[in-house]
Image (cartoon, helix red, strand yellow):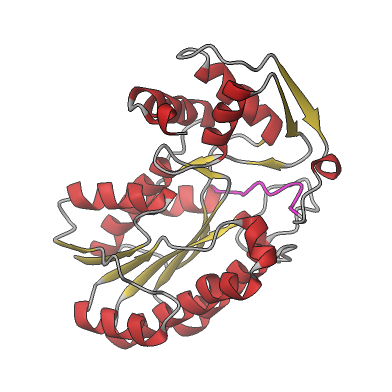
Amino acid sequence: MKILLIGSQGRLGYEILKICKTNKSAHALFNPPDFDITCKKSVFNKINKINPDIVINASGFTDVDLAEREPNKSYRVNRDGPGYLATACYETKSKLIHFSTDYVFNGKTNEPYSENDLISPLSVYGKSKAAGETKVRDRLSEHIIIRTSWLYSSHKNCFVHKIIKLANEQKTLQVVNDQYGCPTFSKDLADTVLIILNLIESKEIKWGTYHYCGKDPITWFQFALRIIELAKRYKTLKVNEILPISTKEYHSIVERPSYSVLNCSLIEKEFNIKRRPFQESLKEMVDQYFLNGKFNCH
């Protein structure tokens, strides 16, 4: 297959790039560093020139707080860009794998969200990603949209890196304890993409929207406790107190869903996906973080 990967410098794209490079079915991999997803002409020119079998869009405007201050940029990247990609893919008969977010839901429930549940995003980020989903669906039938949540990576700065850094600098940490979600290791999601790529190549694929995230819903506070526990195996940290706080006490400019757990039974059934417990995935990531010397970079 001829694969065009967009966004290889991000948390997810970096892992997908590694997998595609070692995947025997990826006969040709294109990873243009100058790809501007917000420029319609650039998108059409690149896709027409490469004529890929599959486009993987791992790019995105993912800074939730910054999106509130720069909504136009968020919509250009998260809505307009996927729309250009989907249209260009339609014209070249290419397939598209695109990623979305749990933030398309408002979190006002206590049951995991399925793919058919109504979306009602609260933030600019969530609204722009929801609009991007609509563009893809409207313009291209042969697509896979994967909604994921709380993505973390050993490659790119994320919540895990931030907690370890703060725990090394401060005696007391305060972490939100009334928002529930499922932390997702980018490597695990990339492994899922590989399975989907192989199914597309064998033409055994059911197009549409799917959910994929780590197993076991937890709060940010519970996530932080586990991160620090694992980090202490490598380093004596300064922190000696971790306090749970409410979302209201956090004073964010963004309204976030309080419960954004995703039901992943569909992707497990259709693609025979086996999800790992988040504790196992997180241990692997923290091990990579310290053993690769990345702690010194933050």
Answer with left or right where residue 23 lies relative to residue 210.
left
Up-down: is 259 above or below 96? above
Up-down: is 122 above or below 234? below
Residue pictured at 42% horizontal, 82% vertical: 39
Q: Nearer the viewer, residue 68 or 114?
A: 68
Q: Quadrant of the N terminus?
A: bottom left
Residue at the right extreme? 248
Residue pictured at 28% horizontal, 79% vertical: 47
Magenta highlight: main SS: loop
Residue 258 in magenta stretch? yes
Up-down: is 45 above or below 1? below
Residue pictured at 47% horizontal, 26% vertical: 280
Q: How many marks?
A: 0
Q: Nearer the viewer, residue 99 or 195?
A: 99
- Start and end of the magenta stretch? 256-264
Q: Would you say residue 218 is visible in this rendering?
A: yes
Answer with left or right where residue 128 lies relative to residue 279.
right
Answer with left or right where residue 24 lies relative to residue 297.
left
Q: Would you say residue 203 is visible in this rendering?
A: no
Residue 181 in magenta stretch? no
Residue pictured at 57% horizontal, 15% vertical: 237
Residue 24 locus on image (x, y percent):
15, 51
The quadrant in which residue 249 appears is top right
Q: Nearer the viewer, residue 201 or 69?
A: 69
Q: Nearer the viewer, residue 105 or 152?
A: 152
The quadrant in which residue 129 appears is bottom right
Residue 254 locus on image (x, y percent):
75, 56
Residue 62 locus on image (x, y percent):
55, 58
